[in-house]
Image (cartoon, grey):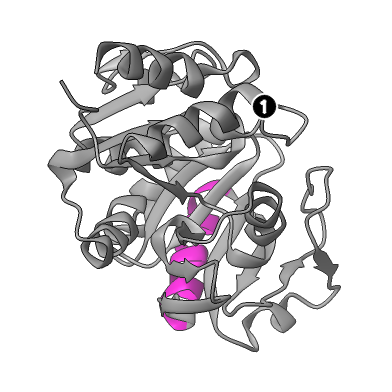
Amino acid sequence: MTFPYKLVATDLDGTLLRDDETVSARTREALKAAAGAGAAHIVVTGRAVPWTRHILDDLGYEGLAVCAQGAQVYHAGERRLLTSLTLDRQLAGLALSKVEAEVGPLALAASRDGLDGEVLVGPGYRVQEGPRPAVFVQDPAEMWAAPLNKVYIQHPDLDDDALAEAARAAVGNLVDVVMAGPGVVEILPLGLSKATGLSLAARRLGVKAADTIAFGDMPNDIPMFAWARHGVAMANAHADLKAVAHETTTSNDDDGIAVVLERLLRES
């Protein structure tokens, strides 16, 4: 019997990364063993490349990574973007006006396109602690001055799920809206998802959806689970993702990826 998958797709935050933003020795060893059994590892994250690169470097990661919710396919070994999809800023502005007409003023941040694209943070937007580079701007117009891959929205009263639901209802078919983590609701190009980026990367690797096992924790991982043959939700995952997962493993802090990979390696 051989290892049943050729591709192991992992989200980062809340999945591959522990809450302290490190990858455990056990998980590193499990991924290495899976690679030895013929399964490539691919990172599939909502983070844009500048917020992902230091993690890939720490892992000694040389392959392809899917970043910015699928907008970017990045070759880590060559340090170059293979694909990059940007958000139509006019459509995004129109979508935001429709959302604000329903729920009131939003706090905004925006992720600029490119290998060194900054995240611009507007007044009132709450930035999570960590090593991620952000530039604070007082004039929201500055956010729209260069190509973007996504816009982040926050509301003073609505929680993440309620904001995402209200935004989706308001924007219609102008853009997509996804909840990607605590305090992280994003506006994306219509039709973009982790699945679109992963399918592009997999095609370059000569691997099919039927060859793929995927790990995640948030609603933005739902399309990836629908694309892959087998979806594994972390114990700490959002209920919406658990509802569509094939199985649930232990949490990101309890080596949930390693638990599953070790089992598959034993069985193969």
Give the quadrant of residue 206: bottom left
Count of numbered marks: 1
Quarter of the image that includes the C terminus: top left
Could you say where residue 86 lies in the image, as x and y percent from the top left?
A: 45, 77
- Going 58% across and 55% down the picture, which residue do you hit? 47
Horizontal arrangement in the rendering, residue 132 relative to residue 51 (left or right): right
Residue 100 belongs to magenta span: yes
Which of the 4 image quarters holds residue 88?
A: bottom left
Left or right position of 148 against 95 = right
Q: Does dot 1 land on a helix, a strand or a loop?
A: helix
Residue shown at 80% from the left, 64% from the top: 134
Which quadrant of the figure contains the N terminus? Answer: top left
Q: Position of residue 115 (x, y in %)?
A: 62, 77
- Asked where in the image residue 27 lies, by quadrant, the reply is top right
Q: Which residues are magenta?
A: 90-103
Near-viewer residue (48 or 215): 215
Q: Residue at point 32% right, 36% down?
A: 222
Q: Position of residue 204 (x, y in %)?
A: 26, 67
For residue 7, side relative to residue 20 (left or right): left
Front-most of 248 and 212? 212
Instruction: State whether residue 9 is above or below residue 176.
Output: above
- Residue under numbered circle 1: 25
- The amino acid at mark 1 is Ala
Confirm whether residue 167 shows in the render: no
- Prevailing SS of the magenta stretch: helix
Who's the residue at 60% across and 65% down the image? Answer: 49
Q: Position of residue 215 (x, y in %)?
A: 40, 31
Do we see residue 25 in this rendering?
A: yes
The local crowd at label 1, few if under 14, some if 14 to 19, many if 20 or more residues have their Cα within 10 Å, is few
Front position in the image: 150 or 169: 150
Magenta run includes residue 264: no
